Image (spheres, rainbow, N blue to C red):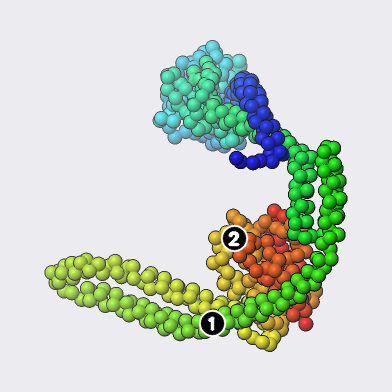
Amino acid sequence: MIKTTVSFALARFVFISCVGLAVIITSLVSTHVVDLVNSEYEKIAKGEITALNSSYRVFLNHHLILLKEQSQESLFVQGIMQPKRNIGKIKDYMAGLTLLGLKYDETLLDFEGSTLHSTSATDTNYQEFPWVKAILNEEQFSSIQILAVEGRYFWCVAFPVIYNKHVEGVLLANIPLETILAAQIDVEVLDGLMIEVVKGTKTIAKFGKQAVGTKQTIQWHDAGVSFNYTVDEAYRNDALYDLVIQMGSYIILAIVLTTLLAYLYGYRYFVKPILALSQLTSSLDKGHEPDALQGDLRFMEFADLFNQFNLMSEKVARRERALKESYEKLSNTNDELKQSESQLVQSEKMASIGVLAAGVAHEINNPIGFIRSNLEVLEDYFSDVEKYYYEFNSTLASEEDKENHKKLAKKYELEFLFKDTPPLIKSSIAGVDRVSEIVKNLKTFARIDQVEKALVDINEGLNATLNMVHNELKYSCKVHIDLQPLPKVHAFPGKLNQVFMNLLINAGQSITDKGDIFVRTFVEEDNIIIEIEDTGSGIDSENITQIFTPFYTSKPIGEGTGLGLSISHQIIEQHNGKIRVKSVLGKGSCFSVSIPIS
């Protein structure tokens, strides 16, 4: 039978109750919110479309007002009355006309509707349009029409030229259809809105992205066109979806918080007293000095149990105190012997590894050197073979010889070999260089057998150590390196590399999934500082004071000796330095090594 704690059972009951209540409330609230949002969204969309359509009207009316001011120029009346004498002046004047700072095609018609002058290169017969006749006959004061010129559509804005309160001609301007959009709308406004300009049954212009949804049509009877505004429902649906997700997130958060509070309540008032009793019982079983059970107990049964247990543990402590003192003396002596023996074995082991690594690195260096040399010579040989092939092909005189040579080359895939072999050789050379770099780092790291201090660059040893433990860290960590220039110091390079390796491996093992390791060096006052920081599980504040104690380890039995940090601490003390640690449980740790420069 699976057992569970009181706090977990209480939290599970609260969680199931809250989930059921949340499902009912969410379904009711979501239905109401969706209906309300749909209604408000349609009102807002209708208001924006009306405002946009009004801005179109204002845009064209502004052009019509400016065109009216231009039509009142006396030169146009003179030109219509005496066209031959004034046509040159009219051309010069119309060449500089603009509307709202932009140059458009403008045309001046006489009292019969014939074109006196036009800045457009296209010849358009305006006499055939009824609205021109209506203006000339004083039946219509102005006009805004859609005009098709050589397959392109324009807003044709027209205003009469009046003399003595009689219409003597017409001044009109052709504004490209898309100008009305560019002048009035920011591009972002078209997101989720498609605008179609329809003349009759034909769509003559379309603005914005393709949209599927509610369509609203506004007729421009005077211009003979209509505007179809289509609001994309995907935007509204996305907004509703985000709203539902947000509301669901809040509900889930509330459920989690309520469940957590229930769990904490059960843990504090039920599980914690029982757990304290269990831990103290276990401590007594191991022979530790007992502590009196204390706590803010709200339940009388727990308070009585704690009092009885305190009396019993005090009696047991008195009986075992004498035996424990003797045992501690013997245990301390034994621990000191074990520590000395283990440190000696560890030092001998590291020295042997250093000698072996240096020998292996030296033996690998020679074959790697002649392999690289041979590859470079092979590359030159192959280049000569390729040159010979192409030069020989160019010396063949007859077509038959060239064809036979081409067949043989195709049979043995010479073209492919000439193309593929050089990259293979270059890749092999790069691989040899990588092996040489590894050998170099191995030789640097392997300086463990030095019995005297030497003048060393700490950054060099740290880089070599990073390369040595790269395979250990690459699957779970991303290493960030920031090494500032450092002065050389007298030190045992191999022992410092052993410290760096212990700290890097510990940092990597503290990261269970994916994380980061930050390696930094810099000078602070008269000391070289080496910081190795990780984003791992961190160290509990209760255990952080014990990490440099010999044989202390948080790893399972058989996976750690508990000597790594202890030996590292002693090595740094041999260099008259200090090693410190800062750690936050669940966030990571930062080990800082300080080595004096002098």
Mark 1 residue crowding within 10 angstroms, few (<14) / some (14–19) / many (20+):
few
The circle drawn on residue 356 is 1
Q: Residue furthest front?
A: 319
Is 530 on the left-hand or right-hand side of 205?
right
Residue 303, placed above or below residue 465: above
The circle drawn on residue 477 is 2
The circle drawn on residue 245 is none
Q: Which residue lies furthest to the top in this view?
A: 139
Query: In terms of depth relative to the viewer, which is nearer, 158 or 559?
Result: 559
Badge 1 element = helix
Badge 2 element = strand
Query: In terms of depth relative to the viewer, which is nearer, 391 or 434?
Result: 434
* Quadrant assignment for the C terminus: bottom right
As measured in the structure, the alpha-carbon distance from the residue carrying label 1 to the one carrying label 2 is: 29 Å
Residue 141, placed above or below residue 363: above
Mark 2 residue crowding within 10 angstroms, few (<14) / some (14–19) / many (20+):
many
Q: Which residue is drawn at 71% across and 84% down?
A: 490
Q: Is residue 425 visible?
A: yes
Amino acid on which the number 1 mark rests in the picture = Leu
Is 140 on the left-hand or right-hand side of 256?
left
Q: Residue at x 33, y 76 (%)?
A: 383
Q: In which quarter of the image is residue 453?
A: bottom right
| Marked residue nearer the N-terminal end (1 or 2) | 1
Q: Position of residue 174 (x, y in %)?
A: 51, 29
